[in-house]
Amino acid sequence: MDLEKKEKPEVPEPQEPQAEKEIIIEEENIDVVVESEPRSETVIDLTEDSAHTGQTPANSAGKRDIDGEWAKALQMNYDPDVAAPLSPPPVPGKTATPPPYRPQPQFNPAPQPAPPADSNLQPASPADPAPQTAPLTPAGVRQPQEGKPKTYLGWAIAVLLCCAFIPGLVAILYAGKVNPRYYAGDINGAQRASELAQYWIIAAIVLGVIKAALYYPLMIAFM
Amino acid sequence: MRIPPVLKYTLIIMTAIIFIAVYFLIDPSTSRFMPKCYFRLLTGWECPGCGTQRALHALLHGNLRQAWSHNPLLLILLPYFGLAAWSNLGSSPLRRRIHAYLNSTPFILLLILLLLAWTLIRNLA
């Protein structure tokens, strides 16, 4: 419905130069009209895609939160701490100044091939990329990649209690460094601290598994 | 790398059921098949996690007092683990707020102090 509405106001814009050409040569009218149509389509597609990108958070309130939650659960990085009002300003700034931690979800390439693909089917071409891009790029999935890194505190404590004492303590210390570094502006440092906490947790789990595996031969040897 | 959610949650639930069954059926204080703490074997000191297996066994049998005597830290941190897991499962505002609170710096410092104090107390006292 929105697509048809947006086509109509944009059609007269390319027609204004046509009117000037009509006065000069009448026969080229048909050619000009034919040439103007794909131009208008490309303009329409771009505006509609940008409109979709702008509308996704608003439309996603009801349905797409579920997908976002699943995507979060799958990717294992969810940063609910970065609220919705905080997310729009850091996106352009962080993409420009620091190197992004992870390759960002490719937001533009999906809509860009759409306009040359279907020149005749106007409603089909914008309608296709919308459901493809929308579940992949809700606000909840993009936020953790540019937002605050995870602290892995719960894992660190669980690992400290169950697997290994000292690596778990190191992991908790690194988890405590994430937030101060992030709020001090050191985003890469916070990211590094989060990664180090993760690595120490993995090391503790591996150590616990090795300990449990070594226990039985030792028990049999010293029995 | 993306694991399908059905497989992921079935794996989690199956491992949880196996762990619960093992710790319900086997008493770690009497059986020789449960692994002991190597920190305690090497140094003679008790790490903050010593007694967690016995406390889990007692907790699964409903003996809260016995679990507390084995390792009070597990009982103290159980609500924390539950809240942390619950806050990670969704993105509603309440979960976001709880997640932010549980990962804030003062809370982490408090946990580190609690753990260090608990190790000192249980080894010195």
Image (spheres, rainbow, N blue to C red):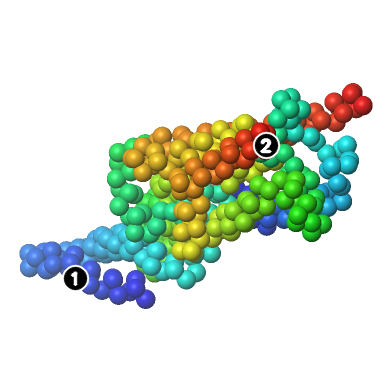
3D distance between C-alphas at marks 2 and 1: 86 Å
Q: Position of residue A16 (x, y in %)?
A: 13, 67
* Mark 2 neighbour density, 10 Å: few (under 14) some (14–19) many (20 or more): few
Q: Indicate left or right for B121 with B64 as reference.
A: left
State the quadrant of the C terminus of chain A: top right
Indicate the secondary structure of the residue bearing disc 2.
loop
Q: Position of residue A193 (x, y in %)?
A: 47, 35
* Mark 1 neighbour density, 10 Å: few (under 14) some (14–19) many (20 or more): few
Q: Amino acid at mark 2?
A: Ala
Chain at numbered mark 1: A
Q: Indicate left or right for A212 with A27 as reference.
A: right
Of the two numbered discs 2 and 1 in the rendering, the one whose residue sits closer to the viewer: 2
User: Which one is nearer the viewer's eye here, A195 or B36?
Assistant: B36
Chain at numbered mark 2: B
Q: Position of residue A126 (x, y in %)?
A: 39, 64
* Residue A12: mark: 1
**Residue at position x 51%, y 36% in the image:** A173
* The quarter of the displayed image where residue A94 is located: top left
| Res. B82 visible in picture | yes
**Residue at position x 23%, y 68% in the image:** A10
| Res. A22 visible in picture | no
**Residue corresponding to mark 2:** B125
* Residue B92: mark: none
